[in-house]
């Protein structure tokens, strides 16, 4: 499973990515989890199974929706509480849940 987290510059999600990786390892889930700036989505979208977006990029939802639809990719916004608490378990659960749909 390949998960991409997107934010404005790709930096603010790095701690969440590390916590998600740790949680995936604890659950024995093989996962590639990366963080990038939202502007890079069109270049890398085909390399990922699911896209998680930080709450700070909500204003880009239309662009993300159109791009994900065109590439048959699933996406979801990380709830502000999960993002703010840097909750790797809940963020990973969110990615797993959206992949099942």
Image (spheres, rainbow, N blue to C red):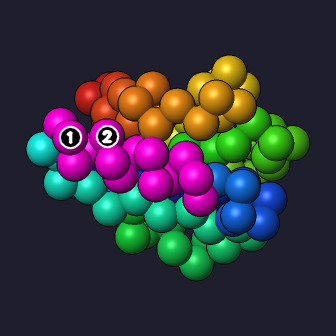
Name the quadrant containing residue 99.
Answer: top left
Residue at the bottom extreme?
43
Residue displayed at 64% across by 44% down: 53
Residue at the left extreme?
28
Q: Magenta segment: does it hold 11?
A: no
- Residue at numbered disc 1: 26
Residue displayed at 77% across by 66% down: 9
Give the left or right position of residue 5, taking residue 10 as reference.
left
Residue displayed at 79% across by 46% down: 57
In the foreground, 12 or 71? 12
Label 1 CA crowd tier, 10 Å (few <14, some 14–19, many 20+): few
Residue displayed at 27% across by 44% down: 24
Residue 93 visible within the image = yes
Q: Predominant secondary structure in magenta?
A: helix
Give the left or right position of residue 25, taking residue 57 as reference.
left
- Residue at numbered disc 2: 23
Q: Which residue range is magenta in the image?
A: 14-27
Q: Where is residue 30 in the image (x, y as percent from the top left)?
A: 18, 54
Q: Magenta segment: does it hold 20?
A: yes
When the figure is inspected, residue 69 is found, relative to residue 46, above or below; the finding is above
Give the left or right position of residue 93, taking residue 44 as reference.
left
Q: Position of residue 77 (x, y in %)?
A: 63, 34
Label 2 CA crowd tier, 10 Å (few <14, some 14–19, many 20+): some
Q: Where is residue 85 in the image (x, y as percent from the top left)?
A: 64, 29
Task: Tell me how far mark 2 sits from mark 1, CA to CA.
Answer: 5 Å
- Split into 4 quadrants, where in the image is the C terminus? top left
- Split into 4 quadrants, where in the image is the N terminus? bottom left
């Amino acid at each position: 499973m390949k998960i991409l987290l997107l934010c404005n510059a790709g930096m603010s999600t790095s701690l969440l990515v590390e916590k998600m990786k740790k949680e995936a390892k604890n659950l024995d889930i093989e996962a590639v989890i990366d963080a990038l700036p939202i502007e890079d989505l069109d270049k890398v979208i085909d390399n990922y199974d699911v896209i998680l977006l930080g709450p700070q990029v909500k204003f880009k939802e239309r662009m993300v929706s159109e791009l994900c639809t065109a590439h048959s990719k699933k996406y979801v916004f990380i709830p502000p509480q999960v993002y703010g608490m840097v909750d790797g378990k809940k963020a990973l659960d969110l990615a797993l849940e959206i992949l099942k749909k």
